[in-house]
């Protein structure tokens, strides 16, 4: 089992068809090491990709090194396996970047986790049953604010865009709060992008910088993540080399692929705009959990999870604790979904890591279970179950 956010998962429209392909759901598997070296992971990857996008890849390893396996293709009608240094949109893995900056501001004494958001953003969280004096920064980080689930769905539930097609955080928040409350603050878990748009506004208010610059200067640049970008509003391009994203429709034993809708990154902003690679995502989570971005006290706050579901998984402050791995212990990271991509990165305290991407996002029958099985296999292969 993995934590998913079905009520908050970003939606996709088929949109105008610029190109399409009818392809078999399987595909050739490729490896940067001998396939026999990671046979179980390769089998799990093929199973995942058979229910996922045109291509899928896993970048994994431990303290001794990393390796990459790929199945299918990153571009339809070609044989181009996804590589570990190719760019894609990470979706909600962005939330861990955003949470890290908020916790840095806490360390600097500029924000308090248990202060009401009204103290920093007066009048922003109000109306429709919301009261910013009762919702804390901690609750926003952990999705326990009671704010209703919301994801923008092009053509269905969209906030108002600026004349240039970009979106303001304040408008995203206003639109997200137009729904009534999901629960009283602190009483329940409801995954909502609106929580992290509010946190983006908090970062901008406290730092005096656009959230994409604050995250870049405080996280991306200090870690030397040269292939990670928090794009500015209006910057819709994926850096090269890139994994092309698709939306798929199952037709019997076939898939019909359409290019994913390319929305302005400001539509997702501090909840889902980051672009990265399998290698850089691994480096980010390894650095975070190793204490290179936060103090031990802040990292402990981040890992103070609220149980979600019945299998032992939990959500902390922008960080997911996995269910128990088949080889024992747990892993830490986050998943993500944005038009064209489904992603997940997990790392363990002893140096193991696994990051997965497929180049499609599904609204029904999404292969979340197969994705976690792949992650678990990559983290546990050749280890004795606990």
Image: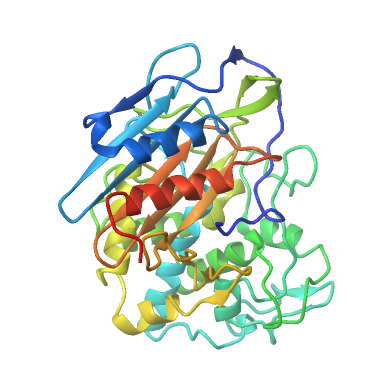
Q: Check the image and report above or below for 283 versus 107.
A: above
Q: Check the image and report above or below for 314 versus 110.
A: above
Q: Position of residue 262 (x, y in %)?
A: 59, 32
Q: Position of residue 205 (x, y in %)?
A: 52, 71
Q: Residue at x 32, y 31 (%)?
A: 83
Q: In which quadrant will I find the C terminus?
A: bottom left
Q: Check the image and report above or below for 345 versus 303.
A: above
Please count the marks in the image.
Answer: 0
118 sits to left or right of 324: right
Image quadrant assignment for residue 19? top right
Work out whether residue 230 can be spotted. no
386 sits to left or right of 145: left
Q: Nearer the viewer, residue 113 or 306?
A: 306
68 sits to left or right of 172: left
Q: Position of residue 66 (x, y in %)?
A: 22, 45
Q: Position of residue 137 (x, y in %)?
A: 56, 79
Q: Check the image and report above or below for 346 versus 106.
A: above
Q: In which quadrant will I find the N terminus?
A: bottom right
């Amino acid at each position: 089992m993995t934590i998913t956010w079905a009520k908050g998962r970003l939606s996709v429209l088929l949109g105008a068809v610029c190109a399409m392909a009818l392809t078999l759901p399987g595909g050739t598997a490729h490896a940067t090491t001998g396939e026999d070296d990671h046979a179980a992971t390769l089998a799990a990857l093929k199973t995942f990709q058979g229910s996922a996008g045109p291509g899928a890849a896993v970048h994994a390893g431990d303290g001794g090194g990393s390796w990459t396996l790929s199945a299918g293709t990153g571009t339809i009608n070609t044989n181009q396996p996804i590589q570990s240094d190719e760019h894609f949109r990470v979706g909600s893995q962005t939330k861990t970047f955003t949470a890290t900056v908020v916790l840095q501001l806490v360390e600097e004494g500029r924000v308090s986790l248990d202060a009401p958001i009204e103290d920093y953003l007066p009048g922003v969280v109000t109306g429709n049953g919301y009261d910013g004096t009762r919702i804390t920064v901690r609750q926003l980080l952990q999705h326990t604010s009671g704010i209703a689930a919301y994801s923008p769905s092009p053509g269905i539930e969209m906030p108002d865009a600026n004349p240039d097609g970009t979106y303001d955080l304040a408008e995203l928040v206003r639109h997200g709060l137009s729904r009534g409350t999901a629960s009283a603050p602190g009483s329940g878990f409801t995954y909502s992008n609106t929580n992290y748009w509010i946190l983006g506004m908090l970062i901008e208010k406290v730092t005096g910088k656009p959230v994409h610059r604050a995250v870049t200067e405080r996280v991306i640049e200090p870690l030397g993540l040269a292939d990670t970008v928090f794009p500015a509003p209006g910057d819709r391009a994926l850096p090269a080399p890139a994994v092309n994203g698709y939306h798929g429709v199952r037709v019997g034993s076939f898939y019909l692929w359409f290019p994913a809708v390319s929305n302005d990154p400001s539509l997702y902003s501090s909840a889902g705009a980051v672009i990265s690679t399998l290698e850089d995502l691994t480096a980010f989570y390894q650095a975070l959990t190793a204490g290179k971005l936060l103090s031990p006290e802040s990292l402990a706050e981040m890992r103070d999870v609220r149980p979600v579901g019945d299998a032992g998984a939990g959500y902390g402050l922008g960080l997911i604790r996995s269910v128990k791995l088949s080889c024992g212990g747990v892993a830490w990271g986050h998943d993500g979904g944005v038009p064209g991509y489904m992603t997940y990165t997990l790392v363990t305290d002893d140096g193991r890591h696994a990051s997965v991407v497929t180049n499609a996002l599904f609204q029904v029958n999404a292969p979340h279970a197969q994705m976690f099985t792949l992650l678990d296999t990559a983290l546990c292969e050749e280890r004795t179950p606990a």
